[in-house]
Image (cartoon, rainbow, N blue to C red):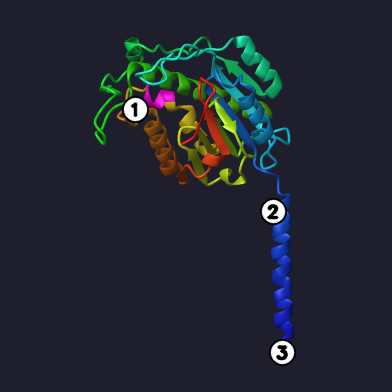
Amino acid sequence: MTSFPFVICIVIQWSAGALRLQLDEHADPPKLAICIVGAARMIVNEKVHGSLERHLLSTKYARGLLKNTPDLFVSVHPGDSKKIKPDGLHSSMSVPESSIRDVMRILTPVNYTIEEGTGPYPFDFSVRHFIPDKLCYKSKFYHVPKNEHYNYFTSDVLGRTMNNFYSHKSCHTLVVQHENDTRLRYDNVMFSRPDIVWRKDFPRALLSRNKMTFGHDWYQVVPRKTSQYLGTLLDEHFLNKDPPVCTAKDPEALVLYTGERAARKEGVELDWTWAYHTYVDVMRPDGRMFNR
């Protein structure tokens, strides 16, 4: 008889644990908006947009605001600078707008924008006229001795970076517009390059209300309350008379700073990681796959 209360306690505790597990399994998955942003050139390749269909847009771990799969938004520009790096050229860095629209019919985004040409910002020195603080993003020569600090923001890189973050802004605006139209709100927002090939199904661990996961500058999956930091990066860091920072040595460092700032202000964790690098490759303009 002395053991009877103990047995009852164990049964009750086990039952409560099983009930919590059952509720978790049947809980609604988080509402996810996916923003594909930047230069469109590789999204027209079947390996790219086919992998989006198979491994990302069909995930069972997230849903949209009004449907059982994530909501896709796209903001891309058909053209880009012919420079791959400051010391290299590539001849074909644009795709026909009609080809992009063909892919949109396949992917069926909630909304999308095809920006004009290469985006609003030029790739020569005139791009600096758009930056109110003339001391920001002063470029040094690209080739430097190992371990010496350098600034990667040549005029070409600066123009491409500003056009990329213009796409972030445009796509995030589409996300907010859909929230306003439906009077619902996403739990997470993902920003991704248009040249990523997914090799595996989207991992559930990327979705969190308390953690931002940055696959460096390839993709970012963030809680909704932090998505505006990436959505307003152009305005905050390039078009602002008093930017939070303007000394980043390259675009990747600026993305990292933005993540750190968002995490600090919103009280969430930032995971800047290559832990999921086996899930994705980047397709180069010549069709070759690249990983870290």
Q: Which mark is residue 24?
A: 2
Determine contact: label 1, label 3, CB under 8 Å: no
| Residue at the (64%, 28%) spot, across then down | 72
Residue type, numbered disc 1? Pro
Residue reaching furthest to the bottom: 1
Q: Position of residue 102 (x, y in %)?
A: 67, 15
Q: Quadrant of residue 68?
A: top right
Going from N to C along the chain, the mark reached first, 1 or 3, is: 3
- Residue range in magenta is 234-238
Q: Position of residue 236 (x, y in %)?
A: 40, 26
Tag 2's secondary structure? Answer: helix
| Residue at the (68%, 30%) spot, across then down | 53
Q: Which mark is residue 243?
A: 1
Q: CA distance from mark 2 to mark 3?
A: 35 Å
Q: Dot 1, how many residues are within 10 Å of its Cα: few (below 14), some (14-19), or many (20+)?
A: some
Residue 88 can be seen in this image: yes
Up the image or down, 133 lies above or below 217; here it is: above
Q: Dot 3, how many residues are within 10 Å of its Cα: few (below 14), some (14-19), or many (20+)?
A: few
Left or right, 2 with respect to 139, comes to right
